[in-house]
Image: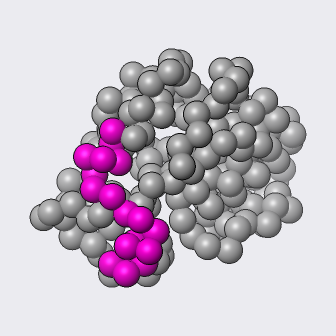
Amino acid sequence: MIQPVQNHDFAGVYIDIESGGFSPKQNPLLEYGWGFLNQDYTIESGDSICILPQAGKVIEPTAAMINGYSEDRWAERGAIDIDAARARIIELFAPYDSIIAFAHNAPFDKNWTEEYIPEIMPKIREWQCTQKWLRRYCNANGIPIEKGTLKLENGCKLAGYRQVDRHGALEDCFSGAGLTRFLVSSGVPYRDN
């Protein structure tokens, strides 16, 4: 259920997508999740929409394994077609302007948003990448960056935040919000000055 934030004084929105691969031109958008962050970077309201695969788009087996996609599972979760999903997301973002969007891999989520829901892009003032922010934190604190260090689940472990068990768009928004709270409290700025 879509629950717009009643108070417009929020810090931003955490966005996460699940897809059928790495290319929005070749692979389908399968899930779009969001969590509106209040001033302490806790999700005030959020949700996700499971989306039926778009015709002519290929679901890569590795992507399906990561996000748990199957026709039966998506049917159980009430997946809707891309046009209906787009309309619901546009309606959700309609009251807002100048939003800061947070995402763990912001270039990836931004790219998919531009491709599938371009109507909300003018609502977003800037995209902040918690993965880049986590890199700045590791560098500032002498933490070696090895393969996998910057993954959301590892950032949550570093932060002492328990990532939710299921990998999905809304769950990743909650995990990303937890990591964001940690990074804010660390004093490491989320952007270079």
Residue found at the far left of this picture: 56
- Specify the quadrant of the image occupied by residue 164: bottom right
Left or right of 142? Residue 70 is left
- State the residue in front, 191 or 142: 191
Q: Which secondary structure class fits the magenta region best?
A: helix
Q: Residue drawn 12% across and 64% down? A: 56
Residue 193 point in image, percent of width and height: 67, 22
Q: Residue drawn 61% across and 46% down? A: 46
Left or right of 152? Residue 81 is left
- State the residue in front, 59 or 51: 51
Left or right of 127? Residue 81 is left
Left or right of 57? Residue 22 is right
Q: Which residues are magenta?
A: 69-87
Q: Is residue 79 visible?
A: yes
Q: Is residue 13 visible?
A: no
Q: Residue drawn 27% across and 43% down? A: 115
Q: Residue drawn 19% across and 64% down? A: 57
